[in-house]
Amino acid sequence: MEVKLHDIGEGMTEANVNHFLVKAGDTVKADQPLVEVQTDKMTAEIPAPFSGRIKELRVGEGETIPVGTTVLLMEREDSVTEAVTTPKKPQGIRARRVLASPYTRKIARENGVDLDSVSGSGAGGRILDEDVYSFIQGERVPSPENPLSVDTELEAKPVLPAASNHEPNTIPFKGRRRQIASKMSHSLRTIAHCTHFEEIDVTNLLEWKETLRTSGQSISMGAYFIKVISVCLKEFPIFNALLDERNECVHLKKEHHIGIATDTEDGLIVPVIKNVESKSMKDIHQEMKELTFKAQENKLTLKDISGGTFTVSNVGPLNGSIGATPIINEPETGLLAFHKTKKRPVVNDQDEIVIRSMMNVSMSFDHRVTDGGNAVRFTNRLRDLIEEPQTLLLELI
């Protein structure tokens, strides 16, 4: 029977084959992970549809394959004799499922390291990058579950770093990078992008945040921004909408499922905070921390990344951006980017030159769904709520 790459959510069209967890001849149980794949949003495992034996691997590690491609061939357990399907395992060695990120697996592959031989120091025995390097350098003893002789371990040592299989001055264009490229290109081709810019005085907000800190409370600027956006989306629901061209309508969503664009080692990914309209800033702050950690550790689930209705990109902490033209996260209607905060002289209402903390925002919207006037009104309302933090409290009462 063919085991194929199926759509694991969010309309994916292809995925990169990161790592096979089995080989030809292996006997597996139903739902046992067979292969790890990478989409533009997440890492996932394809499980065995039934108990049986692996007959043949049909694709190679590192390949990018479209949905529907046959990944491997399996034979059902009840159609294979005991002599053929159950090779005996060496005494003293117990099979285990290796927990490691795609990048850690890549390091191991490039250095010829069998992850079954490495002890993981992460949560639940997860193998980290440093565990692989320590094993290579002979600083860590082999896993007790799969013991090796000292001579075998020493022979496995390669020279670090491993030589690249690519031509000089090139990097691979595959995996998540290629997936992101495909999605961004499609968004630009199909959405009528328009970007509106605004500057916001965040001096009072920073003072309010410091007041909270001295009282023992911690709320990030990002959490405040997301809550403010939710208030604005309630007043301007056209930006919390999904265009359905086939049925010639625009779906206005009541729930505010806000995606937070997150920069990771493997590329951009957008986990989603669900139902922001009904959550406190403390709840938003905590959930942002948890989702960001899961994104960095490649632990996001399909539930974590699906269902977004609006996206936020906070590049301010990188301290290197004063403006951008963000690409909309299709099929959403809007995306708002917050840029770095900088102190500079400003002329106030009394014609006095004062030093204020100023921040720029960039708002991209789908011009097929709404117009510039609405975008200006949206960012004006956003500006007012950020510049005078106490006004948000009145909105939440």
Image (cartoon, helix red, strand yellow):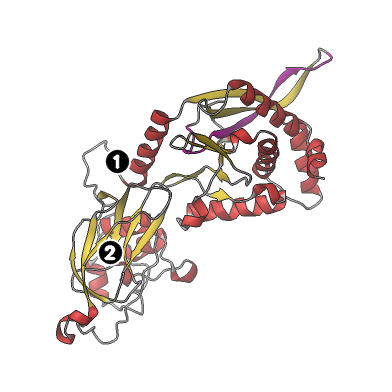
Q: Nearer the viewer, residue 149 or 363?
A: 363
Residue 347 painted magenta: yes
- Going from the N terminus, do you reach mark 1 or mark 2 first? 2
Give the SS element for disc 2.
loop
Instruction: Count residues near mark 2 (Cα–Cα under 10 Å), then give few for <14, some for 14-19, many for 20+.
Output: many
Q: Residue 212, image x and y in percent?
A: 79, 46
**Residue 300 can be seen, yes or no:** no
Magenta stretch: give its range: 327-350
Total marks in image = 2
Q: Is residue 5 above or below residue 91?
A: above
Tell me the tag on residue 173: 1
Q: Is residue 101 left or right of residue 24?
A: right
Q: Nearer the viewer, residue 172 or 379?
A: 379
Q: Residue 255, image x and y in percent?
A: 62, 47
Q: Is residue 378 above or below residue 262?
A: above
Q: Is residue 392 above or below residue 285?
A: above
Instruction: Count residues near mark 1 (Cα–Cα under 10 Å), then give few for <14, some for 14-19, many for 20+.
Output: few
Q: Quadrant of the C terminus?
A: top right
**Disc nearest the viewer among 1 and 2:** 1
Residue 98, quarter of the rendered image: bottom left
Give the SS element for disc 1.
loop
Kind of residue at disc 1: Phe
Residue 18 painted magenta: no
Q: Residue 248, image x and y in percent?
A: 48, 34
Q: Quadrant of the N terminus?
A: bottom left
At 53% from the left edge and 34% from the top edge, which residue is drawn? 333
Give the residue at the far front of this rendering.
247
Q: Is residue 11 left or right of residue 2?
A: right
Q: Which residue is mark 2?
A: 113
Kind of residue at disc 2: Val
**Residue 2 can be seen, yes or no:** yes
